Amino acid sequence: MPVMLPPAAGYLWKSRRRLSASGLVTWERCPRQWFYSRRIGVAQPQNPAMLVGHVAEEAVGSLLMERLRADGGPMPVRSAWVAYSREQDGLDAPAATGEVSITDLDSIRAWFDAVLPSVVDETLRRLAQDWDTVVWRAGGTDIADVGAERMSLLINGGLELQLEEVNACLEDDGGPHLSAYRESGDPFGVPAPCWDEEPVKPGEQASRSAAAGFQKEGSVSLWEAWEVARPWVKDPRVAEPQRQFHPDGWAAGELDMVQRWDGSVRIVDLKASAGTSGFSAGLPIQIRFYQWLWDVTRDTDARPSDGVDAGQVSGLEGWYLAGPYRKQVELLPPDELAEEAARWKAVHETMTQSGLHPTDVPLADPSPWVDHYPGGEPRPVTNVAAAKERTCRMCNAAAFCDAAPVAARAAGLAEVVPPEIPSADPGELSRALEPKTPCIRIRDIPRRLHVRGRLSGHWGPMANHYGEHVHGASVAVGDASVVVEEMGADSFGELPELEDAVLLDAAPGQWRRMPRLYLDEHSSVKPASEAPEGLEFTRLGLIPTKASVSGLVVSRGANSGVGVTGRPWSMQTCHLWDGNDVIEVVAFGSAVTHTFTELKVGDRLRVLAAELGWRDGVPQLRIDQRTTRLEVKRDG
Ligand code: SF4
């Protein structure tokens, strides 16, 4: 729910530094797994099921944004979402395929049945389009494995559960907010999105008036019950992040749905499954995190004001669409929620510290893998050790995590090591991956240094290459000067003007062939008179700017979007493992060469003279199209 813009206001890129529900869920599964997947960004091969959730959830939410005809006339069989989604891709909106008269709940169901084929077709088109952009696919999978039947089951599941809400609203004669709706429309500061209303941006106070179908008095009508029971869902027309941001900025969460018609608040998470897998263990963690975020974002001045008292959070629900099943998660009482929040803050601090040094990785502590009954009820675990090993078997870091059990590690290695290297022999593997000059070990890449000079010419915030707004300045000694920049939005803040300053624990690097120093929360800037005794300072001309490394490609990824300036950006990534450590290698825009695009997991790669950069406190190598050389050795 878009309570407000992020505290730093203005950047659209999701900050990997904030604690998110999914990050917390991964941490609880295994802190070391969080480190590899979230801090270093190691991806996993994509399969079609991974793409289904997002599209199915958007389709369900968007159908709930429909408004019934106020004059009681027949509803054209046409989905506003299908029209919108196709128009976004420059395609024609399909014409209505018929009409359905809405007289009762069954007729609403009949309208859904009639419109569903076109919605399912659109989800399949979107899935095929998304699949085309996936650079690392799980072997033997194809998007054609997701059929119309599956999408139809999921979307229908969401509609069925919402019709239960409408029915309950009818039985409760519209609930306590009906008169407010009749007077001036949706009374909430962040209203439920509707195709017939303008989209509302985060932090914007909506201006709504009662739609034509509201009555002056009398019992609630079916039309009114549909309107009043309409939940808040993510509006696909809004490009800004529709999240709840902790007022201090260190945590954020993106809800799927909020039900508010009964005088209280129920937070709902949509799941495109029946909830039987071990991943269902994450729902209580995720949704209680949202319960807490809801509470801590109520008092902020930036929040648009409600025209009614929305009430307290009364329920936390997981809607497993393949059923459908409504899973109720017990609310945490205030004292336990406060304890949990304190623990989450400590987790966030540990996350922030991790990775400063290659050996500084969080604990390898896999939780047991728990299967669930349909509907997300956990099955008993009889063998905890075996269940923990299963978590490692499911982990995309098992190949290079030294704490992975032997069988899990062997299975992980089999996925990434080409057959010509005998992965079962650790000595052979380590010899095959040993760096040869000029490549160095990943752990020997210079990380932090101290610099002394005149700090001036501060600027910003200005967009960096990730589209984040960062502050910067220059540090000068004599005629030589180097740009100093925040590593990411808000990771350091404003820089002071100082005639004689020391920059401590700055990260060295280069951008567009110019040396650059990056600052984050581990860095500090002070007057030289306050610098600790005995520090060694690096001369500006000796700042390390490049690195050459080699290893096995263990992950591939790609991303694209539109930055704050409105300019599109794109990037591709791979992760290299040198037998000990893993590092991300990134190519932005035109640096995404044919060679980079063709990189595959299992390739042996030498990256020569890459620009040294930083992301979230850990080093990242960036391809300079002109000076970086890629040497690929591929099996077969
Ligand atoms: S392999 Fe096991 S111990 Fe290692 S990161 Fe993965 S889940 Fe954690």
Image: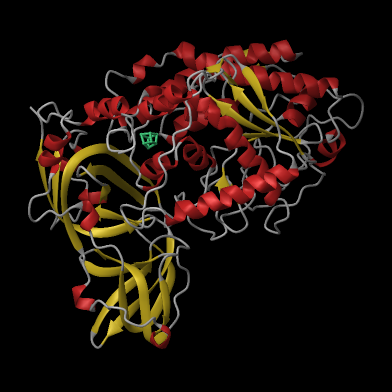
**Which quadrant holds the C terminus?**
top left
Q: Quadrant of residue 595?
A: top left
Tally of numbered discs: 0
Question: x%, y% of residue 620?
Answer: 28, 54
Question: Where in the figure is residue 211, as x and y percent of width and height?
Answer: 76, 35
Of residues 44 and 221, the one drawn nearer to the viewer in this rendering? 44
Q: Quadrant of ligand 1?
A: top left
Q: How is the image coloured?
A: secondary structure
User: Vertical placement of 473 versus 433: above or below?
Assistant: below
Question: Front-most of 432 and 247?
Answer: 432
Estimate the x, y position of residue 317 in percent, counting from the top left. Answer: 66, 28
Residue at the extreme right of the image, as rendered: 218
Residue shown at 21% from the left, 39% from the top: 553
Q: Quadrant of the N terminus?
A: top right
Residue 255 in view: yes
Relative horizontal placement of residue 297, taking residue 12 as reference (left or right): right
Which one is nearer the viewer's eye here, 272 or 287? 287
**Foreground pick, 627 / 174:** 627
Q: Is residue 232 above or below residue 519?
A: above
Q: Give the vertical position of 470 relative to 606 (above or below).
A: below
Name the residue rendered at 56%, 18% in the picture: 380
In this rendering, position of residue 519 left or right of residue 247: left
Name the quadrant containing residue 60: top right
Residue 440 x, y percent position in the rendering: 15, 55
Q: Is residue 292 above or below residue 356?
A: above
Left or right of 50, for residue 343:
right
Q: Is residue 17 visible?
A: no
